[in-house]
Amino acid sequence: MSKILIVEDEVIIRTALRKLLTRNKHDVKEAGSVSEATSKNKLDTFDLIISDLRLPGAPGTDLIQLAGDVPVLIMTSYASLRSAVDSMRMGAVDYIAKPFDHDEMLAAVKRVIGKSASLAAAVSKNATGEYDKEIEGMIGTSPVMKELYSKIHKVAPTNATVLVNGETGTGKELVANAIHRESPRREKSIISVNCAAIPETLIEAELFGHEKGAFTGAATMREGLVAAADGGTLFLDEIGELPLEAQARLLRVLQEGEVRPIGAVESKKVDVRLIAATHRDLGRLVREKKFREDLYFRINVVQLKLPPLRERGKDILALAETFVKRYCAETRRAPLSLTPEAIQAITTYSWPGNIRELENAMQRSVILCENETEIDHTQLSIDLDLVKVDDDYPEEAKENATKANKQASSNEPNEDLSLEDYFQRFVLEHQDSMSETELAKKLGVSRKCLWERRQRLGIPRTKSNQSASTAK
């Protein structure tokens, strides 16, 4: 059971969050300010601290330093987005925009606690801190990347075969190069081969070489890429695309340490370290008889899993800013910064193409940006599925609001209310007596955020609410 501290001055949000986390088997404590949190609790005993950014007295970001190694998740409204980004630069593990639904919060908590536990386990195995160093050419300080760095530092000096698994665009070749640079083979070459980029009819000849006249078109003898990597490292990207015949030849290289070119009588001894990479599930391919089981177990000695970009928290912004700086220099432009709206878009988008897609988006934004100082979210050209605000509510939205009114007017307590349920109930119960500004302030969100959430949940403003807002 994980111990979580909630620091939030708005009682309705704090209560909803406590009930949500308690139902999901977490041990939860709460406080209304930084001073209350520190006076009543020992911060280093918690697994996670969830804090609002704006609190009475000291801001929530003060907890980042006070909590030491305990991760701090910052809650913020749209209006204070720039401050949220600054808090991540100060060391917050991540931020989440208010209002949020229960699934969004639970996913963030699970992600932060899970990665923090993994990192703690890795650090405990290496008390000297030797493996905490970052990797040259790789950007990221999130817990999941620190764990990856630790594994790279450990496996690189060995001769073990490594299988790198990750989605397309996550940087598998960067990992292979990092392993080679830190290995005793660094003075020799690393030969990189994309198995998916070579036609099936040529892959064996490319990898293992051929004798003159071995097949039609083989006018001369050719050394294969495996032999070219002798004494160094062979990196086979997308190994799941390797044909079964080539898999059998590769297995012999790994088992016997020798390669026999196509058409040759004798084999040649080779000393090659193999690093393989794939975005596919090799275990499933084995069950489908599309990948040799014996080869799978031979290459799966040490497996490194690269996280998708969407799971790397504050690394996303660091990567984006690095790419902007790089392409500003390449295009000889004055340095550009990202607007708060662009930062929100970048850090909330799912990035299915991972780092490669992010880099392309930043390069495109720098090239097409007409502003001399800033890149806005409109120039990112990514499918953000942003909510559009519209004053005209359709009939079905009004029906949803009527049903919600009936639910909210019920006197029966409901312990299973999600954060969205609390949001909806609070608005329905108080909108006749409060203006939009007052409602937004009580909920800890901006008026724009309140307006967008009204539209999504189908809660139109009442006449009395509109009058109250006008009077204010």
Image (cartoon, grey):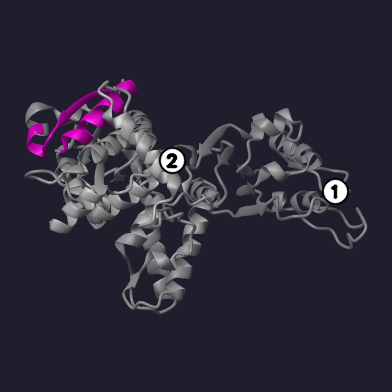
Mark 1 or 2: in front is 2
Q: Position of residue 10 (x, y in %)?
A: 16, 38
Q: Are marks 1 and 2 in contact (CB under 8 Å)?
A: no
Task: Classify residue 94 by image quadrant.
Answer: top left
Q: Quadrant of the C terminus?
A: bottom left
Which residues are drawn in magenta? 10-36
Q: Amino acid at mark 2?
A: Leu
Q: Amino acid at mark 1?
A: Ile
Element type at mark 2: helix
Residue 326 in sight from this viewpoint:
yes
Asked if residue 241 is among those painted magenta in the image, a careful observer would answer no
Q: Position of residue 67 (x, y in %)?
A: 18, 36
The disc at residue 262 is: 1
Front residue of this view, candidates 432 and 100: 432
The disc at residue 148 is: 2
Residue at image position (87%, 47%) is 264
Element type at mark 1: loop
Distance between the alpha carbons at the discs numbered 1 and 2: 38 Å
